[in-house]
């Protein structure tokens, strides 16, 4: 066969393949799912479906079921959104405050990671910085978003505590207060607890702090500074925490006597990060290093969100993706995001390289319960947004709103079809319900695409996208799982 005939044959084959691919594109419909537009949720009423054990606050701890290092138990807690502590605000105002907190939290995380990556060499374990460094956490401006009620001390005094996967140190406001912000419950008084114990300066627990010091009695002091200038400072101690009627002893926590800044009405914070001093790390094998949460869509359900510690935290239906480790910091939960599909088709410009963490700890993707809106590194966000706009071209556009640049006017509609969105993690394709990415932003029927771009190389998967999934943290297996309809 001559060279000209070969070229003609190759050209003909190319045309046939192109026509076949175009035909396939035409015949495979753009995948849509139904969204039932709901208005912004009204201010939630704070109530606990479990019997609130206030009457047990004077019960002797010998009557409670205690955990020791050789026992594994399971605990389930109710979670409530911080909006429940602001009952006098309108839905619009609550949403605005949530976006303000969200912006501050995202900036704080980016700043924290940037400083940690720039630190060379990494901080050696056990090296103290005598308050010279700043531990930046997600509670800036009251962020953290979800709280529970648990007992502190012996006998237990029940307090509202924010739960945060982006923080490590557990702390609570304590009397006497040099300066304390306003909280819903009475300030915890350590002198009335039989299980409160200070930590000596030379102990491994004290050396585990990023920022520590000593008082005149050579007892450990802690300090946690936040991105907005808020700070908590006081005695680093061990104390008993009571989850309903399960008692967990010897938890290292900060007893804060000087707590300044724009915190909310909760009494303190239960850090759920990956660092050495977080609650999951401290309790370790007592809960088999497993916990999970399920965050309900507050516009669609009146039941509370929930958190589970122990083996029951891991659903059989969960799809798992491996946890990655940042060599420069251990607080955050890193995962590998490979791509995103919109309308049933992988967005071609979203490649794994956009989400890759390099050897220095730059970039990557974290799962965070305290960030609301998912932020994707900007090239990935633009590609995803453009694909979504194309698939939603039948919907009437609305003006941009806050950080959202893709909004729609759905006023008067009871049902609309929107493109599907799937996040492709390594080993787990997570298909999002429509309510997890098209959300109401006012009472006039404006809905926005609940993603945003960031100039940072770090992407954050926020809690709006996690709604209705049980997100399972199996630290023993170094993996995170997603179980659809996990709140049922």
Image (cartoon, rainbow, N blue to C red):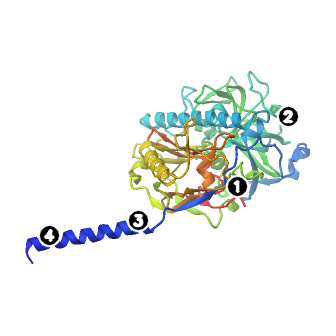
**Circle nearer the N terminus (2, 1):** 2
CB atoms at circles 3 and 4 under 8 Å apart?
no
Q: Marks 2 and 3: which is nearer the front?
A: 3
Q: Which mark is residue 192?
A: 2
**What element does badge 4 sit on?**
helix
- Real-space Cα separation, disc 2 to disc 3, in angstroms: 70 Å
Residue 315 x/y as whole percent: 65, 64
Residue shown at 68%/51% (left/top)? 295
**What element does badge 2 sit on?**
helix
Q: Decide: is 259 above or below 282.
A: above
Q: Which mark is residue 7?
A: 4
Mark yes or no: residue 248 visible: yes
- Real-space Cα separation, disc 1 to disc 3, in angstroms: 46 Å
Q: Quadrant of residue 34?
A: bottom right
Q: Is residue 71 left or right of residue 333?
A: right
- Real-space Cα separation, disc 3 to disc 4, in angstroms: 27 Å
Label 1 crowd (10 A; few <14 / some 14-19 / many >=20): many
Which quadrant is the C terminus positioned in?
Answer: bottom right
> Given the current orientation, which residue lies at the most extreme bottom position?
1
Q: Which residue is mark 1?
A: 309
Residue shown at 60%/25% (left/top)? 229
Q: Decide: is 135 above or below 270.
A: above
**Circle nearer the N terminus (1, 4):** 4
Q: Which residue is mark 3?
A: 25
Label 4 crowd (10 A; few <14 / some 14-19 / many >=20): few
CB atoms at circles 2 and 4 under 8 Å apart?
no
CB atoms at circles 1 and 3 under 8 Å apart?
no
CB atoms at circles 2 and 3 under 8 Å apart?
no
- Real-space Cα separation, disc 2 to disc 4, in angstroms: 90 Å
Residue 405 x/y as whole percent: 52, 40
């Amino acid at each position: 066969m001559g060279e000209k005939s070969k070229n003609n044959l190759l050209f003909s084959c190319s045309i046939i393949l192109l026509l076949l691919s175009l035909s396939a594109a035409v015949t495979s419909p753009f995948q849509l799912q139904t969204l039932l537009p709901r208005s912004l949720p009204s201010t939630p009423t704070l109530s606990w479906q479990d019997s609130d054990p206030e009457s047990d606050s004077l019960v002797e701890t010998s009557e409670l079921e205690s955990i020791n290092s050789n026992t594994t138990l399971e605990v389930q807690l109710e979670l409530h959104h911080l909006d429940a502590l602001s009952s006098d605000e309108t839905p619009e105002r609550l949403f605005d405050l949530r976006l303000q907190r969200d912006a501050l939290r995202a900036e704080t995380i980016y700043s924290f990671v940037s400083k940690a990556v720039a630190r060379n060499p990494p901080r050696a374990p056990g090296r103290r910085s005598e308050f010279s460094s700043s531990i930046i956490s997600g509670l800036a401006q009251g962020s953290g978003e979800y709280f529970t009620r648990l007992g502190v001390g012996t006998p237990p005094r029940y307090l509202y505590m924010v739960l945060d996967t982006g923080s490590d140190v557990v702390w609570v406001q304590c009397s006497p207060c040099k300066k304390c912000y306003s909280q819903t419950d009475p300030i915890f008084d350590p002198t009335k607890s039989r299980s409160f114990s200070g930590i000596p300066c030379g102990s491994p627990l004290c050396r585990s702090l990023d920022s520590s010091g000593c008082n005149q009695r050579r007892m450990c002091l802690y300090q946690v500074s936040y991105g907005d200038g808020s700070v908590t400072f006081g005695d680093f101690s061990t104390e008993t925490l009571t989850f309903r009627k399960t008692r967990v002893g010897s938890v290292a926590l900060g007893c804060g006597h000087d707590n300044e800044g724009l915190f909310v009405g909760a009494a303190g914070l239960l850090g759920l990060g990956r660092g050495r001093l977080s609650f999951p790390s401290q309790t370790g094998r007592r809960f088999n290093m497993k916990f999970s949460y399920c965050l309900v869509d507050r516009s669609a359900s009146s039941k509370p969100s929930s958190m589970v510690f122990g083996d029951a935290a891991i659903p059989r239906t969960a799809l798992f993706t491996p946890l990655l480790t940042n060599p420069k910091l251990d607080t955050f939960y890193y995962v590998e995001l490979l791509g995103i599909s919109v309308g049933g088709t992988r967005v071609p410009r979203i490649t794994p390289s956009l989400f890759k963490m390099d050897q220095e700890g730059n970039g990557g993707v974290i799962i965070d319960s305290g960030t609301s809106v998912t932020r994707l590194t900007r090239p990935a966000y633009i590609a995803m947004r453009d694909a979504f706009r194309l698939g939603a071209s039948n919907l009437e556009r609305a003006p941009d709103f806050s950080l959202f640049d893709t909004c729609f006017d759905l006023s008067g509609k009871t049902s609309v079809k929107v493109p599907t969105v799937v996040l492709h993690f390594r080993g787990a394709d997570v298909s999002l319900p429509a309510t997890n990415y098209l959300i109401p932003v006012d009472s006039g029927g404006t809905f926005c695409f609940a993603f945003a771009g960031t100039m940072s190389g770090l992407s954050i998967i926020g809690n709006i996208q996690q709604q209705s999934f049980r997100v399972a943290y199996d630290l023993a297996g170094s993996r995170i799982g997603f179980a659809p309809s996990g709140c049922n």
